[in-house]
Image (tube, helix red, strand yellow):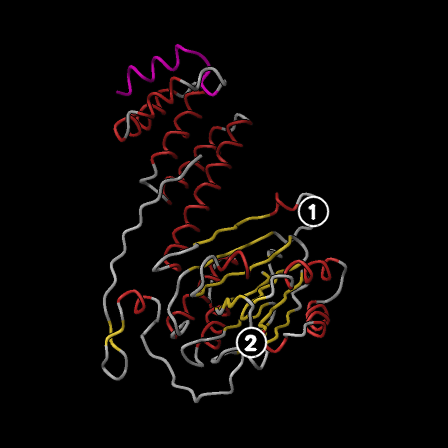
Amino acid sequence: MPRFVLVVLAVAACHRDDGSPVPAAAAACRGRGTFATLPLGPATGSSLRPAHTFSIVARDAKTGELGVAVQSHWFSVGALVAWAEPGVGAVATQSFVEPAYGPKGLALMGQGVPAPDALARLVAEDKQAAMRQVAFVDAQGRAAAHTGDKCIQVASDHVGSGYTVEANIMANDKVVPAMAAAFEAARGDLADRMLAALDAAQAAGGDLRGCQSAAIVVVSGKRSDAPWNERELDLRVEDSPAPLDELHRLVVLARAYDQMNQGDAAVEKSDMAGALAHYGAAARAVPDNIEMKFWQAVALAGHGRIDDALPMFRATFAADPAWAELTRRLVAPGLLPDAATAERVLREAR
């Protein structure tokens, strides 16, 4: 079902340490607006795609979940950087990015090759390894990272217990330590902890250029012949003046829709108490979402709970009469039991 999203952003200007103004959009993406000045280095060049960025690759020791979270000043960074396979591992490939590290690394880890060995093997085969930044974590929590000596500074990585953090073309050398500390201190599930690491990177200065896109992928620790069923989050912000803010919003929305799905599954089992609990959790997470109200009302009415459904129908019909027309169309596919139910809803909810 289509989603229509309106985001309103207010951004305040700030100043660099020398007093000169930072453009408002850049200021929003540059933490405190501070950055280090480094000496000029030797000239290098590459025709490869530069996905300079900061990212985290991690495994949750309690659940076995695997994930990648990333932000960059590069369009659609998630399509290039973030790779994960349930019960196998996760990969971030960045700097002058070679996307092949993703599928090749997952294939090796899927064959039982430990993450450090898999990464070392692929780096040894890469003639442009000096320009790469890559991180692997496998399903056992073994982690490894590579930062080539020709990555644009400030570039570094840190390998911790079951995770890696890595960054290049950063504003300063505080970004990677801030990510590691935030991830280790954070509470919540794997997505919450990875987002905390990205937030800390941004607050420490982030990408020297600002920001543009972000992504998060979380898969289960269960290896499966149907890996698409084990993909828990797969969200991208392709182009935004505040991608981390938008990514946080999308994670909340994704979790709310998951609650809706669980509610629908409970309805199918005639577990209306469970359905209402899940629907209520979704409504509390995104109380202004009209579509969630509508489909919750449909599920209730379809199982004889018309009185419970009517207030939700009223809210949706008041927001847009198109929902009333949609209600008429739900009898034929069996989402409402009969025309009499639809007629009662239309009569009493308007």
What kind of residue is marked 2?
Answer: His
What kind of residue is marked 1?
Answer: Ser
For the N terminus, the image quarter is top left
Does the stretch in magenta take in 284? no
Return the disc, 1 or 2, that comes first in the chain's sequence.
Answer: 2
Residue carrying label 2: 158
How far apart, in angstroms, are the residues tagged by discs 1 and 2?
Answer: 30 Å
For the C terminus, the image quarter is top left
Residue occupying image coordinates x 36% and y 24%: 309
Relative image position of residue 139 (x, y in whole percent)? 67, 60
Residue at the bottom extreme of this rendering: 39
Q: Secondary structure at mark 1?
A: loop
Q: In this picture, is 207 found above or below 221?
A: below
Q: In this picture, is 49 found above or below 148?
A: above
Relative image position of residue 213 (x, y in whole percent)? 43, 59
Relative image position of residue 283 (x, y in whole percent)? 37, 39
What is the span of residues highlighted in magenta in the rendered image? 335-350
Does the stretch in magenta take in 336? yes
Q: In this picture, is 204 found above or below 10?
A: below
Residue occupying image coordinates x 73% and y 57%: 110
